[in-house]
Amino acid sequence: MVDRPVAHPPARLKKRADFLAVRRGEKRRGRLFLLEVLDRGDQGAPRLGITVTKKVGNAVVRNRIRRRLKEACRTHAAHDMAAGKDYVIVARRSILDAPFASLQDELSRRIGEAGRGRERG
């Protein structure tokens, strides 16, 4: 794992309409989460949204998952986000059991794949 300087977190998606718009974009499925990416067509700052459904667990569990994802993104994956893109992470419960380093690597890898466009079918 490469030590990177701690960056400011990316801008947040807050409105339901923004989350629904990102669903039309590219999807990257992984063991820990689903990453949805939408190219907005501008050069604005990348934006991030995190979704943790109720079937994952109660509020305490969902908030722990959300905090882990936010920190992994802030410390590691924010550098890989491309300008003009919106990212939504749909979390799975397995994030709680995964070592933090593997969560960071998986997040960085998925965001990097999505930033390069569709290379796989």
Image (cartoon, grey):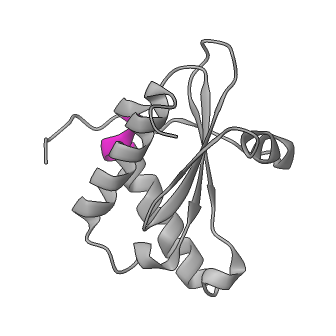
- Considering every residue shown, the one lying at the far top of the view is 43
Judged from this view, the residue extending furthest toward the left is: 2
Residue at left offset 44%, top offset 26%:
116
Q: Is residue 30 above or below residue 2?
A: below
Count of numbered badges drawn on the protein: 0
**Residue, far front:** 121
Describe residue 56's horizontal placement relative to residue 2 as left or right: right
Residue drawn where x is 61% and y is 86% of the image: 57
Region rendered in magenta: 74-78
Picture residue at 50% right of the left edge, 79% below the top: 93
Q: Position of residue 98 (x, y in %)?
A: 31, 74
Q: Nearer the viewer, residue 95 or 120?
A: 120
The front one of 47 and 118 is 118
Look at 74% across and 46% down and name the residue there.
23
Q: Residue furthest bottom?
A: 58
Residue 106: within the magenta? no
Tell me, yes or no, whether the highlighted magenta stretch contains residue 76.
yes
Vertically, is 117 above or below 70? above
Return the x and y of residue 66 as percentages of the image width and height: 53, 65
From this view, report whether residue 99 is shown above or below residue 10. Answer: below
Q: Position of residue 97 (x, y in %)?
A: 34, 80
Dominant secondary structure of the magenta stretch? Answer: helix
Quadrant in the rendering for residue 111: top left
Say whether residue 56 is left or right of residue 95.
Answer: right
The picture places residue 29, in percent across and down from the top left corner, at 51, 57
- Left or right, 32 with respect to 121, comes to left
